[in-house]
Image (spheres, rainbow, N blue to C red):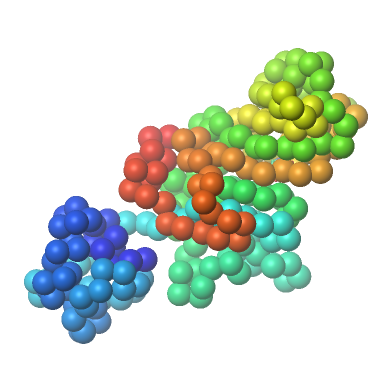
């Protein structure tokens, strides 16, 4: 994490105030003066301001545009995990808050904040998640009604009411909104309608939207505003 963000997150001032403090040479990292606002530190580093050690209390939050071919796990014996997309220094303590299938792409939040992750994933909190899907066959108004009513599979699995917003230009393309996160949920919902998902991209989780500037495989820290919005869940 950048030193200016570290200090702002540790409530040492606004981002511009802490930048001034850094440029004035008042900040030391592991005993060495640090005048570079973009210098990378991690929670294990000793950061001092005006000779006083800063206690770092905040968590870290990253938005990843997950590419296909990676599993949403911290380790796996055979597969590449989403953590492999982060450098070793950042990786410590991070885990994916939620899951996307290996072949799915799009928004994945990675954090070391267990409490927030629990809230995001808990079925009690009904956090809406939006996905762009492409299907083999065109989607229909009957599919829209079935999704809205909630789907029950032949094995008794129940999926709550979901939104299906079919593209006007291409009926094999739609935005699905679900509030649960059951295993392969959208694929199974679509299969129950005798169709098949061939592309699935998560666009948003609650108030957090995938940054369109983030290429697949790239990540960035959440802004203070995005972190604040997530805490409202
Ligand atoms: N539903 C699925 O079927 N797969 C995902 O990756 C996410 C939601």
| Residue sitting farthest toward the bottom | 32
User: Residue at coordinates 56% horizontally, 31% vertically from top-left?
Assistant: 128
Image point (54%, 39%), residue name: 205
Residue 182 image offset from top left, x and y in percent: 69, 38
Q: In which image quadrant can residue 203 be found?
A: top right
Which residue appears farthest toward the left when viewing the image? 50
Q: Quadrant of residue 102?
A: bottom right
173 to 217, vertically: above or below? above
- Tell me if I can see residue 114 in this picture: yes
Q: Nearer the viewer, residue 110 or 220?
A: 220
Q: Where residue 34 sits in the image (x, y, percent)? A: 22, 77
State the image coordinates of residue 193 (x, y, percent, origin top left).
Answer: 86, 26
Instruction: Decide which of 166, 184 is in the foreground and name it.
Output: 166
Give the vertical position of 207 relative to 163 (above or below).
below
Position of 177 with respect to 45 (left or right) is right
Residue sitting at x 44%, y 45%: 116
Q: Position of residue 167 (x, y in %)?
A: 71, 27
Q: Nearer the viewer, residue 101 or 124?
A: 101
Q: Is residue 107 left or right of residue 156?
A: left
Q: How many marks?
A: 0
Dividing the image into four equal quarters, which quarter contains ligand 1?
top right
Q: What is the residue that sits farthest to the right in this orientation? A: 194
Residue 57 visible in the picture: no
The residue sitting at the front extreme is 169
Q: In the picture, which quadrant includes the C terminus?
A: top left
Q: Quadrant of the N terminus?
A: bottom left
Does residue 198 sit above or below 43 in this rendering?
above
**24 or 101: nearer the eye?**
24
Could you tell me which residue is drawn at 39 percent across and 44 percent down?
Answer: 226
């Amino acid at each position: 994490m950048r030193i200016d963000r570290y200090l702002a997150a540790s409530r040492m001032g606004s981002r511009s105030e802490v930048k001034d403090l850094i440029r004035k040479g008042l900040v030391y990292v592991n005993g060495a003066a640090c005048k570079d606002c973009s210098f990378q530190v991690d929670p294990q580093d000793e950061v001092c301001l005006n000779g006083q050690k800063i206690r770092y209390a905040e968590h870290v939050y990253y938005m990843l545009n997950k590419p296909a071919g990676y599993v949403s796990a911290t380790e796996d014996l055979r597969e590449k995990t989403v953590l492999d997309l982060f450098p070793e220094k950042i990786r410590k303590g991070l885990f994916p808050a939620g899951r996307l299938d290996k072949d799915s792409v799009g928004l994945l939040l990675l954090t070391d904040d267990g409490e927030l992750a629990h809230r995001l994933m808990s079925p009690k909190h009904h956090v809406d998640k939006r996905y762009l899907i492409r299907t083999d066959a065109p989607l229909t108004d009957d599919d829209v009604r079935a999704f809205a009513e909630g789907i029950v599979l032949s094995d008794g699995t129940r999926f709550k009411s979901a939104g299906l917003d079919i593209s006007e230009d291409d009926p094999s393309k739609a935005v699905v909104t679900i509030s649960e996160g059951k295993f392969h949920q959208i694929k199974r919902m679509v299969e129950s309608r005798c169709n098949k998902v061939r592309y699935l991209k998560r666009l948003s989780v609650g108030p957090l939207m995938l940054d369109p500037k983030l290429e697949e495989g790239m990540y960035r820290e959440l802004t203070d505003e995005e972190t604040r919005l997530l805490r409202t869940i």
